[in-house]
Image: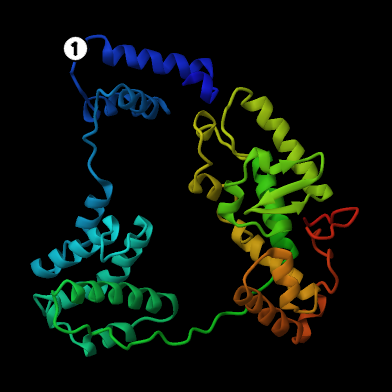
Amino acid sequence: MAETRGWSDIVHRTLNRNLVMLLAGHLEDERIRFSDYHRVLRGRGDSLHHVTEVLATMGVLLDDRPDTFDAWLAGKLTDLSPAIHRDVERWARALRNGGPRVRRRDEATIRNYVRHAQTPLTDWSQRYGHLREVTRDDFLTALASRRGFARTGMLTALRSLFTWAKREGLIFRNPTTGIKNSPRERPILQPLTDDEISHAVTAATTPHARLFIALAAIYAARHGDIRAIRLDDVDLGNRRITIAGRARHIDDLTHQVLAGWLNYRRQRWPNTANPYLLISKESAVHHGPVSHPWVGLLLRGLPATIERLRIDRQLDEALACGADPLHLAAVFDIDNSTAIRYVTSARQLLQRPHEAQLPTSPGTRRSTPHNPPDKPSGSS
């Protein structure tokens, strides 16, 4: 395991020492409970994870860790009446486990559903003892108190709950039938200022932070797509990089940043077997990508986040190309509705007198991935 994952001698010795401590008095057919050792090893870095994996591979682990989802769900349903509590819990577990009549959902989606439904369900629990007592007027009143994304989230969550309850025979009538979400006015996308971009560039003091900013600001790469890039997706010799399954040309600035990161990666973790381009001290001893929170720490507190840089790059291209949705869809490989949204914002910005200072030609603020200039702009 150490050889295939490129562990350092420190990681290897720590794991061996902890395994000797746990297995010195081990008897045949004896199983070791996770709760018996996790407190001792919790402060020893990744050793807890490695020890657990080795014991599971040996077949001697008794994993008695409590389910975090169960504890979280119980806390959210505390204020509900008993019958409503029971039905909502069954609904959440049905979404989590899936079945012949229920499509399995991601745990993050289920948590969002429960959060959006929690407030109206708590209010109804003060008056009703069962979901079948909730009327259409009650549902409309709850929706009236929400706007925008909050209204959409509540409608989606409660519609899922009552549709499931009707299918299971728990209610006689679905109060959400026929209620549609009101058209939502999307705000006009605003470009970042030069100061905001400069602050983001200044904050990028590490090689991995500079790489993230370059990929977001030049290629409009999404957060998850950057984390998913593998080493074999990068071809510095031929100046090609594959992002989200699409090969892109590497401009001079990105080439410089990529070369700097790869040199740092090679010196910092020479023996790592992680196949991903971006790694951290935690992921270097594993085979998976860096975590979402780790990336979020790079530009925390700044207006020019990775997502804002990505949006700004696409909006900049829409302003530069004369608000052509076909050009935007071809450059960034986005769907028609997304391209139209950026084009709509660009047209409204171009019609305003104070937007005369916006760039009017490609590459004014940053190099473009489809036709990079000889020299990248400083703001990139």
- Count of marks placed on residues: 1
Q: Which of 206 and 186 is in front in this view?
A: 186
Q: Quadrant of residue 23?
A: top left
Can the viewer see residue 203 in this picture? yes
134 sits left or right of 210 in the view = left
Where residue 228 appears, x then y in whole percent? 58, 47
290 sits left or right of 40 in the view = right
Q: In which quarter of the image is residue 35?
A: top left
Determine the residue positioned at 63% across, 75% down.
336
Q: Nearer the viewer, residue 89 or 354?
A: 89
Determine the residue positioned at 33% across, 75% down.
154
Q: Nearer the viewer, residue 152 or 56?
A: 56
Which amino acid type is shown beneath numbered disc 1? Leu
| Location of the C terminus (image quadrant) | bottom right
Q: Which residue reaches farthest front?
A: 100
User: In the image, is residue 355 above or below residue 218?
Assistant: below
Determine the residue positioned at 20% across, 22% down.
31
Q: Name the residue under label 1.
A: 27
Label 1 Cα crowd, 10 Å radius (few <14 / some 14-19 / many 20+): few
Can the viewer see residue 192 in this picture? no
Determine the residue positioned at 61% across, 56% down.
306
Q: Which residue reaches farthest right?
A: 374
39 sits left or right of 134 in the view = right
Where residue 238 appears, x then y in whole percent? 82, 43
Where residue 196 appears, x then y in whole percent? 69, 61
User: In the image, is residue 295 above or below residue 105?
Assistant: above
State the colouring used for the structure image.
Answer: rainbow
Where residue 264 appears, x then y in whole percent? 69, 31
Q: Which residue reaches farthest top?
A: 24
Q: Is mark 1 on a helix, strand or loop?
A: loop
User: In the image, is residue 360 above or below residue 351?
Assistant: above
